[in-house]
Amino acid sequence: MMSHKAATPGHTPEHAAFLHAAVRRTRLVFAAQAALLILFFALWEGLARAGIIDAFIFSQPTRVIAGAQGLLAAGRLWQHLGATLGMTLLGFALSSIFGIAIAVALWWNEFLRKVLDPYLVMFNSMPKTALAPVIIVMFGTNYRSVLITAILTSIIVTIMNMLQAFLEVQHEKIKLVYTFGGTKLQTLTKVVLPASVPSIFNTLRINIGLSFIGVVVGEFLVANVGLGFLIIYGSQIFRMDWVMLSILLLMLMAVGLYRAVAWLERASRHYN
Amino acid sequence: MGYVLELKNIGMNFHDAQGETIAVDDVSFGVSRGEFVSIVGPSGCGKSTLLSIISGMVKPSRGECTIGGTPVSAGGKTHSTVGYMLQSDHLFEWRTIMGNVRLGLEVRKDLTPASLTACENLLSRYGLAEFRDHRPSQLSGGMRQRAALIRTLAIDPAILLLDEPFSALDFQTRLHVTDDISTIIRKEGRTAVLVTHDISEAVSVSDRVIVLSKRPSRILNIHSVGLSDAETPPIKAREHPSFRKHFNTIWKELEG
């Protein structure tokens, strides 16, 4: 079947040239990406220095760095970072565990599933962050409210995605377990859950992003620590360097969290 | 001689919003130990329903089904004596071939050194030993069917139920796989009931062919065929002079 392929890559001069060009293209893309980033910050700094944009409003990279150093010296930077990261991970873990557990319950019980279906659809389509003020009234201005906002933001999508994945498992595969005299619990553990592993990771990837949004919104409203808090506080006292710093850190953190889930997925595939 | 499997006046009704449908009207037959019996009939005539009843997964509306003299009760212990092969192999991609083969033993909580050794023996006897740690997707269609059969044989069933097990394969592969699987079943001396809508398949593999009518299904006729055995594979049986005669008779019966 492989006979039309050369045994070793780069064996023929033509193929070597092809590989060389491919490597060059990849490098070129990377170089262009780096250049774009540098250009953005240089332009930002340059425009601010030239007075074309107001550095008081838009801040500027050197001010952001100075702001970061100040926070670092005061020992506050890690506190803010840690609070947001910790809350996000906690919210993510809780909404993943409970979301998957609820999805299992709904898969198990058709009556429950049918009863709750319209409510899930309704709840899924509403912007969950609209509930944040209500949560604060109910649970107080503390970290419980931040956590609950994070969980509410991500759990419904987790439930819906996982339930759909469970229900899409081929009926015949489930029947196979029954042909061996299996129980419903065995169809869950031997077929439905293992078959849904790819969907579980897809859901986790969405979930981590949503928990992150929930935490930041929660911090906007109630926290006195965390990057969300720093954005609101900074904007109120016109420390735009803090605001911009927080946004940059949020971006980095989002990428890091997404990568962590992707890594987890690869690790699990190896394990399998 | 007594039958290992016996169906007496089996009837099955299905219910939906439109009303009640009689799928199986009145079906009685017996299968002897080591016999290979096929059930043919038009699609939707309740062939698969009969297998579900024999396996105990579905309770018939009327009649009685016994295996080795004991009645099959839905969800009961008789599962231990029935092995079921579905329309496609349904090997789990998240398990290795060995992992798939031992699924039935796991489900039945029967993982013993002896039963595992039996699995290994089946794998090596039928040329899959070197693939025991491979993923199903790394195997050809024919080897996957073998693995699926070994998974079914691993629980040491008294009766094998084959529900159009090769219908997902292309014609060429299908002929070879049918040969392969039926030869294994013959060599292992298993009792098998095959459901199919392919008359030539039924005639080439079976000792007897049971012809079912359209819904509500009844038995139209039972033919003694016996063109293949452990030495004569189904492809050879197709060359037998009486193959065409059996085929034509059954075809005319089904045409009504």
Image: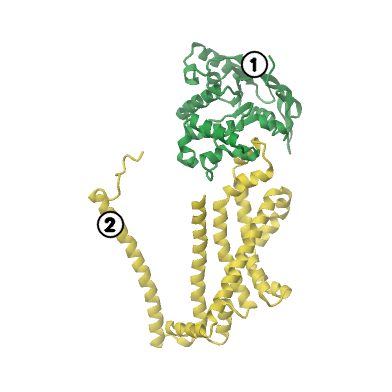
Chain colours: A yellow, B green
Residue corresponding to mark 1: B221
Disc sitting over residue A80 in the figure: none
Chain under numbered label 2: A
Left or right: residue A141 compared with residue A239: right
Disc sitting over residue A20 in the figure: 2
Depicted A174 relative to depicted A221: above or below = above
Q: How crowded is mark 1: few (under 14 residues within 10 Å), some or many (20 or more)?
A: few
Q: Residue at 28% of width from left, 57% of height from top?
A: A21
Label 1 – label 2 distance at C-alpha: 71 Å
Say which quadrant the N terminus of chain A sits in: top left
Q: Horizontal and vertical percent for residue A214?
A: 61, 69
Q: Is residue B140 visible?
A: no
- Given the current orientation, which residue lies at the most extreme right position? B62
**Amino acid carrying mark 1 in the image:** Asn
Q: Residue at 49% of width from left, 20% of height from top?
A: B233
Q: Horizontal and vertical percent for residue A80?
A: 56, 78
Q: Horizontal and vertical percent for residue A182?
A: 67, 39
- Given the current orientation, which residue lies at the most extreme top position? B241
Q: Do labels 1 and 2 share a chain?
A: no
Q: Is residue B123 visible?
A: yes
Look at the numbered disc 1 and give the secondary structure of its residue. Answer: strand
Look at the numbered disc 2 and give the secondary structure of its residue. Answer: helix
Depicted A73 relative to depicted B83: above or below = below
The answer to which of A31 and B89 lies nearer the viewer is: B89
Q: Horizontal and vertical percent for residue B117?
A: 56, 34
Chain under numbered label 1: B
**Amino acid carrying mark 2 in the image:** His
- Given the current orientation, which residue lies at the most extreme left position? A13
Q: Residue at 51% of width from left, 14% of height from top?
A: B244
The answer to which of B94 and A30 lies nearer the viewer is: B94
Residue A216 quadrant = bottom right
